[in-house]
Image (cartoon, coloured by chain):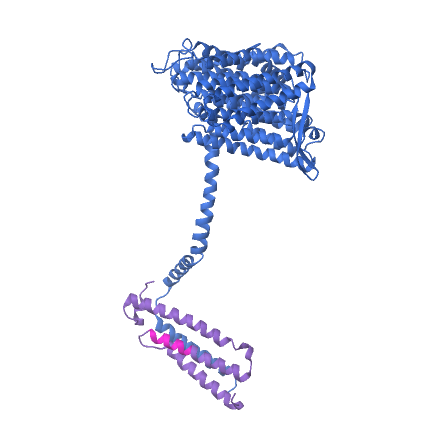
Chain colours: A purple, B blue
Amino acid sequence: MVLIHDYLIEQIHLNIIIAFTIVLIGVLIYRSHLISTLLCLEGIILSLFILIVLLISHYHIFPTSIIPLVLLVFSACEAGIGLALLVTISYTYGNDFVQNLNLLQC
Amino acid sequence: MNFTLNSMILLSIIMLVSPLLYNMLMPHKTTYFPTYCKNMIMMAFMTSLPPMIIFMLYGQESVITNWHWFSITTFNISMSFKLDFFSIIFIPIALYDAWSILEFSLWYMHSDIFIHKFFKYLVSFLLTMIILVSANNLFQLFIGWEGVGIMSFLLIGWWYGRTDANTAALQAIIYNRIGDIGFMLTMAWLMLNSNSWELQNIFSTNMDFIALLGLIIAATGKSAQFGLHPWLPSAMEGPTPVSALLHSSTMVVAGIFLLIRFHPMMENNQMILTTILCLGAMTTLFTAICAITQNDIKKIVAFSTSSQLGLMMVTVGLNQPHLAFLHICTHAFFKAMLFLCSGSIIHSLNDEQDIRKMGGLFLILPITSSALMTGSLALVGTPFLAGFYSKDSIIEAINTSYTNSWALMMTLIATSLTAIYSLRIIYYALLGNPRFSSISPINENNPNLINPIMRLAMGSIFAGFLVTMSIPPMTSITMTMPDMIKLSALLITLAGLAIGMELNSFTNKLMNSMKHTTNFSNMLGYFTYFTHRIYPLMNLYSGQRIATMLIDMNWYEKTGPKGQTNIHSSMSSLLTSTQKGLIKVYFMSFLISITLALMFASMSTNNF
């Protein structure tokens, strides 16, 4: 394990949190394609994963090191559901433009 | 005297075994085998008469214990014969009936190629019946009990190509088996609580309600009391000699005989006596009601048998087992004769059994019709014929004893119905104009037919008197009673005859007003339709419900994929009707509110 000084570790945490914020804005603001939301969702998961692993290995709380793996499992399920929704929308409308979704269809 | 009685009874039983041995050792010599059987039964009857005469003169009873069969720790079973009042008198009567019936079946089954097998079955049936009647311990009695059940099955299904005959044989076995459960209950109770199956040991213990109830169930199964009765009318699918021997004189009285054997145990238990009384009253009335609208001559006589069995049960329930036994003996004569006369009529009309297609046989078959009328008169209890001594005594006893008045009323009504259905047979079969086709092989010139009927007719006229005057009186009968009570049996029978004549003339004048009641009576009170259909149907339904509906469809489908689909799609269609789908606006508002909240939170902590 590389020794990291006390004030440096906070900069690394800030870095990852800024990455998370950028991806979050990416989820919420997009032009027309729904697939960009799904991509940025994966990005959120990735940044959270890295953050948790760093926290665990820096503060040596190894009993909780199963948590990142569980997060990964649930993210896989969630990506699958997202893709299924994308396929359904694409099947119904032919494209994944988000302007289609304001019609009251189930 | 002791030696004579024991050895002659044993010789009589050995004579029954010899035709079976003959057929086993020389199975190819079948030409004179039926006549040989009949002669051996006649010899066995003659051999069993001296013991009966010795008993009547000296009152000598005996118990013969031959050899020790097996022991299970302290429980011993040996082969023993109990020759007391009941068995010494019953064995000659059963052999007399069997002799007449075997001679009759020489005429009736003459054209059957397996006639030697038929006689073999009849002789083995008779052997098991005698074993049942003379058994001293319950094991031997059970051997006889099962034996008569098996032979009944083989003989009812004699014409096994016929579906109805197979069904009837199976029905007989199943109903008898249900009765056997009761018998085994009693045997098990006795094995546990009294350590012996010998009748002498049992008579010195007290029997519980459960054990006696087992005996009642056994009698219900074997003697066709109400609840387990449908096998007896269905058993008429067998040939007429089978009906005459098994299902009128001998096998069906086995249940009543068992109750009579155990009467010392039941004397003091009023609950058991009342159960037997009410069961017998129910049986006798129900089967008499069914008998009055049947159209098959053998079924009418079968229901008549069932009704008389109910009457015997009523007598046992009145704590008068000796009267019941007397009725068994006299009933054997005239009922067997009624069956033989019906067999003669059936064969003469080219196997026609429906009384709506008979008629006018009164002058054409003189011997048969006079025997039929004698038997019917004996059945209804005409004074001083055979049935009078037993039946009138029973009606007097039930009228003058402190008993259930409902049972009394049922028995009296059934007595008047007896007259009605006897009159029905006579009216439809013998009187009026002929309703059968003109080419009928009407012939009663064969001595094999005439002699048995004459013999049994002599029996039905004189047997009541002879047996009553010869047996020692075991109970004291009521000597004084009002005139009406004394004449009640006769008056009820005459009233029944008058009503019967009136009812029979209804069909001539086509009054159809009694449609529903005749349906109830003709279809046996719908009892068979309910019990034979509903119980298996319920079982099959529950099986299908558990296997298919519960397991397959419910656990695998509804709580699995299909249920989830239904829940989710119904919930989402409920929710989406409230939204408008403006996703970008929703996301933008989310972003702005999160940013504002974070800024607000960090500013309020005063820590920058």
State yes or no: residue A43 in magenta: yes
Of residues A38 and B350, the one nearer the viewer is: B350
The secondary structure making up most of the magenta span is helix
How far across and how far down the image is residue B551, in percent? Answer: 46, 52
Residue B567 seen in render: yes
At horizontal 54% and vertical 31% (from top left) the residue drawn is B176
Of residues B300 and B478, the one nearer the viewer is: B300
Q: Quadrant of residue B410?
A: top right
Of residues B48 and B231, the one nearer the viewer is: B48
Q: Specify the segment rendered in magenta.
A: A34-44
Of residues B73 and B430, the one nearer the viewer is: B73
State yes or no: residue B528 in magenta: no
How far across and how far down the image is residue B503, in percent? Answer: 44, 15
Instruction: Answer above or below: position of B10 versus B468.
Output: below
Q: Residue furthest left?
A: A94
How far across and how far down the image is residue B145, in percent? Answer: 57, 30
- Asked if residue B367 lies left or right of residue B81, the reply is left
Q: Quadrant of the N terminus of chain B?
A: top right
Q: Quadrant of residue B256?
A: top right
How far across and how far down the image is residue B63, in percent? Answer: 68, 25
